[in-house]
Image: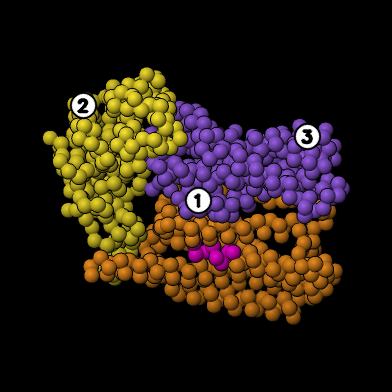
Amino acid sequence: MAVLSLFANPHRFMAISKPFAWGFTMLGGGMILYGVYMGLFVAPADVRQGDAARIMFVHVPSMWLSMFAFAFMAGASFVSLIWRHALADVAAKSAAPIGAVFTALGLITGSIWGYPIWGTWWEWDARITSVLILFFIYLGYLAVWQAMETPQKAARAAAILCLVGAANLPIIHFSVDWWNTLHQPATFFTEDNNAPYGFKVPMYIVALGYLSLFGGLTLINMRAEIMMTRAEMMMQRKLAAG
Amino acid sequence: MKLKGAGAAFLRELKLAWSGGGGAALPLGFFAAACSLTPLTLGPESDLLKAAGPGVIWIALALSSLLPMERLFQADLEDGTLDAYAGSGVALEGIAAAKTAAHWVATGLPLALVSPVLWIMLQGPVAAAPMVALISAIGSAAFFFFGAIGAALAAGVRRGGLLIALVALPLYSPAMIFGAAAMYAAAAGGDWGPALMLTAAAALFGVALSPFAAALALRAAID
Amino acid sequence: MIDASSRVIETHDLAASRGLRLLFNGVTLRLGAGEVLELRGANGSGKSTLLRILAGLTRPFAGTVHYSGAPGEKGEEAPRHYLGHSDAIKPNETAGDQALFWARFFGRDDEVAVQALDRMGLASRAGVPGRGLSAGQRRRLAIARLLIEPRPVWLLDEPVAALDAQGRTRVEELIAEHAAEGGITVVAMHGPGFAGARTLDLAEAAGCALAPGGFKGGDAGEFS
């Protein structure tokens, strides 16, 4: 609890988060660039799919991050509803667009991966379908923040939606898996688990880079959100006084 | 958790759902119209309609179930009834469940009863028609209760219909998948049992989750 | 009837906000059985919000509300009636049916509904649907709910708005009876008040724009 209270006061949060926000972002960017370089030029080509499989170094980590971001939002929403911690609302709101972008990135790179191999730009694979549904949940979450009258109401509604979505995700995933076995025997996106370690290192580096970038961008968003609230209050105070 | 008044609320809501705004007429009309338009796009060939029909009916059922959602909590929020319920001592979860159940009985069940007719129209085998009504009844329960979560979240929002759809449709996915599979199994004369059980499971999950999520959302809307 | 025992409402340092604006702060009061509190203040000063906070509908920005009452009763669930600006009247249901609904909702006999309508002078309008009632009749129907289910705490937001002189007298009688039975009444109003009632003017408890930080538990910072 001591760690939580460290961030409870937004002034302290603002002071502490500044170096981390920019530090994580830079670190993340650097790691991504390095990981992508390794994936494109250093790792050997895949036995079955050739060079086309190189996109997996970008695709798979973004799928991971899209789920991690949602788990982060769910945790923040839980804290927000139970402990009513205002920073938790801001954290969830700040992470959402980043998570949504990772999700979209996963879908797009999945599509690009599929094209040379399937011959079509879209395929209804179990995992892609699950991620597509997750993407719509993200959109719904962002829509709730926009639609509500006041930020306080939006925060509570969004938190509820996030938790409901999180509770349903395992069921959605199970149902899509079930549907997929019914309609399509072969899944496409198999990572070759017998591949030598060196083949997967770029993926882990990119994944860590994404994680760092996620952390940095979320902190930047949170700071922006807090600054906007303060600006709003100053304006209100001015209007009330003058 | 005090639930005593929920029964009275259920009966009142049932009466109001039937009387105000024509009750089930609009969703029924939409359901029938949407299904009737399908041959216009797919062509009247019996084979193609047989292949696509069950899926089309299921989608139309889901979308028709979304229609009453906008009204579910909005009116009570606006005219102060929700305030009266919230301050009454009766659990808001019970109220939400009672209202959703009442609307399902008033609209969802009629939709389910009409589905065999549309099934036959889209070249489904007549022998399977009773099954279709059962599958639709269970599926519409899932759609109504998950839809209620969206309705509660969007309760204070002007023209919240789109928001309700965006929130509810991802939650509909399991019921969509399992229900459609059951419909297709019924069409093929095969074993619709497992798919129906899964659909029922999805519906039960919705029934269990919806009152709590909706009550949380309604408390936020009243605040 | 109402248990007129040691029922008490206490608030401590209550503050309410709307958006980023503080409506009032530092409201500390203690109401005992049989007391009537009038809330006064200009429109927008937070009378309705205070009532809603006491009703448990709105969360305060700061401070606490504590109900204590008959033994064996949890403070939070202390039974109360909240009568807001809106009448909670359905347009398509008749007045009689709505009263009947509330009687059944609260687990009372149907007779009680009829008596409540009688008391509020609506017996002749029992068959009229909500949309056919005048504003004053709707208000009286809303007040009838208080009679159907007796509860020790009444939180009333402008109960006599839209009522004529006869209606106002009726409401004054009801509040007097309620107080005599040991009930607590908090009523937001304009105009002439009740004899023996305490008054709280919310304009005097007004706050400035929100404390800097704006978050619960935030301390004064560089913007104070």
Percent coordinates x, y for residue A70 in the rendering: 57, 58
Residue B154 appears in the picture as rendered: yes
Q: Depth check: A99 or C98 in front?
A: C98
Q: Quadrant of the N terminus of chain B?
A: top left
Looking at the picture, do discs 2 and 1 lie on one chain? no
Q: Which residue is mark 2?
A: C177
Colour assigned to chain C in the rendering is yellow
Q: Nearer the viewer, mark 3 or mark 2?
A: 3
Q: Are marks 3 and 2 on the same chain?
A: no
Query: Which quadrant of the structure image shows residue B32?
Result: top right
| Residue at 38%, 60% in the rendered image | A8
Q: In the rendering, what colour is chain B?
A: purple
Q: Amino acid at mark 2?
A: Glu
Residue A92, given in percent of the width and then of the height, sits at 50, 60
Is label 3 in contact with label 2 (beta carbons under 8 Å)?
no
The orange-tinted chain is A
Q: Which residue is mark 3?
A: B129
Chain for mark 2?
Answer: C
Q: CA distance from mark 3 to mark 1?
A: 36 Å
Give the residues in magenta.
Answer: A93-100
Residue at mark 2 to residue at mark 1: CA–CA distance: 41 Å
Q: Position of residue A139 (x, y in %)?
A: 58, 60
Determine whether, in the image, residue A17 is placed left or right of residue C73.
right
What residue sits 24% from the left and 33% below the top? C167
- Which residue matches tag 1? B154
Above-or-below relation of C223 to A158: below
List x then y, in percent, for residue A43: 76, 76
Q: Is residue A209 left or right of residue A53?
A: left
